[in-house]
Image (cartoon, coloured by chain):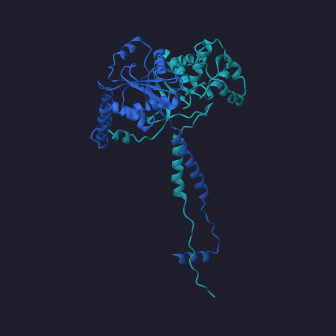
Chain colours: A blue, B cyan
Amino acid sequence: MEVIQTDKKKGRKKKKFDTRVNFTPLVDMIMLLLTFFMLATTLSKPQTMEISMPTKDKVATEEQNEVKASEAMTIYLGADHTVYYYEGLPDIEKKDFLKKTDFSDKGLRSVLSEKNANIVKQVRELKNKKSLLQISAEDFEKQLSELKNSKGSPVVIIKPLDSSDYSDMIAALDEMIINSIGKYAIVDINADDKTMLRNANVAVE
Amino acid sequence: MARPTLPKRDTWIDMTPMSDVMVLLLTFFMLTSTFLKPEPVTVNTPMSVSEIKIPEKNIFSVLISPKGQVFLDIDNPDDRIAVLEKMAANYKITLTDKEKYDFGIATSFGVPMQNFKEFMGLPLEKQNELLPNYGVPTDSLDNQFKGWIQAAREVKGKDMIIAIKADQSTPYSHIKNVMGSLQDLRENRYNLITSLREVTDEPAKGKL
């Protein structure tokens, strides 16, 4: 092949122009733009957390009072990412009924997963089933929400103090998701809470 | 004397298929990407494990700065203008067409209605420079934030999603203010914008 080609060229004695264009700079540029767009798209999409707040209507407050003491848990978010909690009704007589914890893995998370142990276990089984493709995604969602709102599941009331910040609130809501707690609410602290916290030597302001 | 010539190897690689593929990918990414809108204040959203993506349409975003200033944004320019007209009527402000148009194409807004006329009269660079000093009033005396939400709800209907984006170091008292206003308006469902955090929840659960 090669030999024939050179022979031909020699025969014509005319300089053949190379019509091929160098694409390398173009590819370079495109590569750069591509990388930019790829990074820009993946980073720009923020996550969101859907939240429903309790209404200020009277019906809602009556419903809240019906929660059994054994299922209830109240969490206070304080300054410097501290968390105080008590289970059931506040028992002021007893010393340190108000326990202190934090947002670490061994803090609030283990407290909540212990409180919600039964459901956490069931949710894990459900997740296993899903990963083994034994149930469809829709069934999983349905059963998950049923489990989370089943009778006897804990009800957590989150009360952020003014000294806490937004990340604390999000972290607390996060723990609800992680520990499969379906019933929770963010409630503002009232005067009773403040006096109770002051008595327990917690800085309120 | 004829020297045996080695055939010259062509080192030129044909880049055409490669550039074809690259252009295709580039077009795809360019078309699917949505650009970040510039925000008047930089906000670091807190991390969360929630993996729900924010919908792209019909959003009313509320930006809360670490100092507690509130800035708002409505995605559709036509809706923005309609909402502005409602607000202007409530605050007895007459607007020119130019002001409406400028407002429609602007990014976040957050100037009290009293300063609105004066602010819109400024050149664009000046506006962007001054905007971080303002913020929608949310105090109980003059809660313009409520006004904006109500006006937007009327314009955009019940599918409008309220998305709160706050800095992680924003004190809760500011958040409470905004959430309280929303609660007063019976806007009980809204979204909190967070960034994704990978969580290893298994060890904590494994201890049981």
Count of numbered labels shown in the rendering: 0
Closer to the camera in the image, B103 or A15: B103
Residue B114: percent from the left, percent from the top?
67, 16
Q: Position of residue B90 (x, y in %)?
A: 60, 12
Q: Quadrant of residue A131?
A: top left
Q: Residue B66 location, x and y as percent? A: 59, 29
Q: Quadrant of residue B199?
A: top left
Depth order, front residue of B129/B44: B44
Residue A199, placed above or below residue A139 = above
Query: Taking the image as drawn, is residue B159 in sight?
Result: no
Name the spot of residue B94 as percent of width and height, x first: 67, 14
Residue A89 in the figure: left or right of residue A41: left
In the rendered image, which quarter is residue A15 located in?
bottom right
Can you name the residue that lies furthest to the bottom here? B1
Residue drawn at point x = 29 percent, y = 44 percent: A132
Above or below residue A131? Residue A65 is: above
Residue at 45% from the left image edge and 27% from the top image edge: A84
Looking at the image, the residue that sits furthest to the left is A134
In the rendered view of the protein, which quadrant contains the C terminus of chain A?
Answer: top right
Q: Is residue A96 visible?
A: yes
Q: Nearer the viewer, residue A19 or B131?
A: B131
Which is more toward the observer, B49 or B113? B49
